[in-house]
Amino acid sequence: MARRTRTGQREAALARVIAVVNDKGGVGKTSIAANLGGQFAGAGHRCLLVDLNRQANLADDLGYRGTDIDDEGAGLLASVLTGTPLVPARDVRPQLDVVCGGTRLEDLTPVMVSRLQHHGRESFRVLGDVLAPVSAGYDLIFIDCPPESTILTDLALGSARWVLMPTKSDLGGLLGMTLVAERFALARGINARLGLLGVVLFATGTRARAIHGEALAAIDDAFGGTSPRFETSIRHAERTAQDARRLGKLAHELEVAAAAQPAWWEELRSGTRTTRISETASGVAEDYRALGVEVLSALEAAETAEKPRTRRRGAKA
């Protein structure tokens, strides 16, 4: 009974942990985690981002690389090694905390390989064990997963309640998604509650409907039938992507900054030339807002659907 109680407490603590996963790089995992976390935080939701990537691209998107808070993954590594709760960096943005990734996570893979050999796949529950004690302080938690690292992906899948999977419509993105579908099925052996929240097309043309249709059919095939998909796609806007990394700003922050900059003809008349922020930031920010609404709606619908089952189990007990 005590073990069942602890398991239930852990599941409740991790109920809004979302792993952003695709085995292919460059399909928008970090951008989606950062922008959803930032927008939800701006709307008053307390959010946590967990960076499992050795490249730590979240540090660029949020502008904290090389600052005092950037421990390059040392804190995350120490928590996994010792089993002690994670210690996030506070208020990278108001209401938004981060567990930093970085080069120190290179040591995490051999540690997990050793544990896997001695303790089996149950070892992959450790991230959830160190995340659960701090999760009560957050409304939403996003795990930014690295590409082409099955060990670190399995750590995320062993801990998350939900998977949000971005993909591009090209062959590489869809192949990466298919590989994750295989990891997803395997992860449910130790994390039976893991569910697919939805798949989102990233960096795609807004009018490429035929390509979208082909990609969505491939998504259904990867997950064995009709899969949950978000209607919103994140448009391709190279200048906005470059501005985001250059300035360490999220799409909605770029949108505000672009609106505040002087008109180009005013700069021309004054002789003051600056690197201008692309006006496409507004459209990208709107895409993330629409995706955020869909994500919250999907979470609320899933949680509502689970409540009757919870009551029935309680009544039977």
Image (cartoon, rainbow, N blue to C red):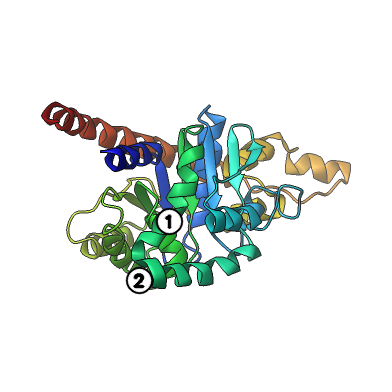
Image point (87%, 41%), residue name = 270
**Residue 256 location (% of width, % of height):** 64, 35
Image point (37%, 55%), residue name = 158
The answer to whether 109 is drawn above or below residue 62 in the figure is below
The answer to whether 274 is drawn above or below residue 110 in the figure is above
Q: Residue furthest left?
A: 316
**Amino acid type indicated by mark 2:** Leu
Position of the C terminus, as image quadrant, is: top left
**Residue 265 location (% of width, % of height):** 76, 42
Quadrant assignment, res 82: bottom right
Is 116 situated left or right of 244 in this image? left
> Considering depth in this image, is 158 or 274 the residue closer to the camera?
158
Q: Would you say the residues marked 1 and 2 are in contact, meaning their CB atoms lie under 8 Å apart?
A: no
Which residue bears the numbered disc 1?
Answer: 156
Q: Which mark is residue 175?
A: 2
Image point (76%, 48%), residue name = 68
- The mark that comes first in sequence, 1 or 2, is 1
**Amino acid type indicated by mark 1:** Ala
Q: Which mark is residue 223?
A: none
User: How dense is the environment of label 1, judged by Cα within 10 Å: few (below 14), some, or many (20 and up)?
Assistant: many
Estimate the spatial distance between the alpha carbons at disc 1 and disc 2, rounded to whole Å. Answer: 20 Å
**Residue 255 location (% of width, % of height):** 61, 39
Image point (65%, 53%), residue name = 59
Is 38 situated left or right of 125 in this image? right
Question: Is residue 236 visible from the viewing direction of this image?
Answer: no
Q: Nearer the viewer, mark 1 or mark 2?
A: 1
